[in-house]
Amino acid sequence: MPLALNVKIKLMKQHPDVVYRYGRALYINLTNRCPNACVFCMKKSWNMRYRSYNLELGKAEPEAPAIIDELKRQTAQQQADEIVFCGYGEPFYRLDTLLETAACAPKLPGKPKTRVNTIGLGNMIAGEDVTPKLKGLLDTICVSLNTSSPEQWLEIVRPQPAFREKGFEGVCDFVRRCTKYVPQTVVTAVEYPSVDIPAVRRLAASLGAGFRAREYMPDYQDK
């Protein structure tokens, strides 16, 4: 990262943003914990910032009542089309908080839709099938599978040891199960140079899910 840009990022506000607005959606930053260290993740290259927001929570992970109060405050000022659980971490590490917060969405002004962005290891993290708990609470779940190859998945997703042997299979199974309980289940892949995007699209279809390619953004962007 260029020195001037690094200095600019560090000069941004230092307190963490738990609920942040981007476009017509409000995003919820539940945790910085993640079982993967993806080669294309912006967490480090963007210095834990997203646009003008500071997503570095440290150990102070937010609880549902505080998140809900902030959602109420922000939607009273400006309605949102969607509430998205997406920060620099895996939301399924905070499943109970996620579910409690998602349940409040229909009561917010404008009744925003709900979405979770995940790397798809939720069942393996919990040690059980958690997908039935999503029924009636989520409108969309986006699962970042990123490749159609188990071997490449290990190379570019770089999971922790506990997820290496069965992780790719576990993500695919998670997608299949989500299609039973979440109206829109979407597999996503970053347009990383070595990834065969059409192959990921075909795999998503075989799992019963939709597909969306995501832009590869190695360089920090203000807006």
Image: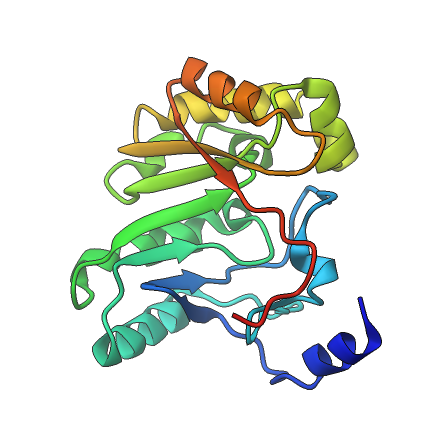
Give x and y (percent) for residue 221. 60, 67
> Quadrant of residue 171 in the image?
top right
Res. 182 in view: no
Query: Residue 4: in sight, yes or no?
Result: yes
Q: Residue at x 27, y 65 (%)?
A: 80
Q: Check the picture and name the quadrant holding the N terminus.
A: bottom right
Position of residue 210 relative to residue 96, above or below, is above
What residue is shown at x 25% (from left), y 76% (from top)?
78
What's the coloring here? rainbow
All told, the count of numbered labels is: 0
Q: Residue furthest right?
A: 3
Nearer-the-camera pick, 189 or 35: 189
Closer to us: 80 or 68? 80
Estimate the x, y position of residue 210 in percent, counting from the top left: 38, 28
| Residue 151 horizontal/vertical position (percent) | 74, 20
The answer to which quarter of the image holds residue 133 is top left
Going 41% across and 52% down the picture, which residue do you hit?
98
Q: Is residue 56 above or below residue 113?
A: below
Q: Is residue 71 above or below residue 213?
A: below
Taking the spot 55% from the left edge, 48% from the top edge, the residue there is 93
Front residue of 75 and 42: 42
Instruction: Locate residue 167, reporting x and y percent.
Output: 65, 26
Q: Nearer the viewer, residue 111 or 160?
A: 111
Vertical comparison of 160 with 105: above or below: above
Q: Place residue 153 in its image quadrant.
A: top right
Find the residue positioned furthest to the top.
206
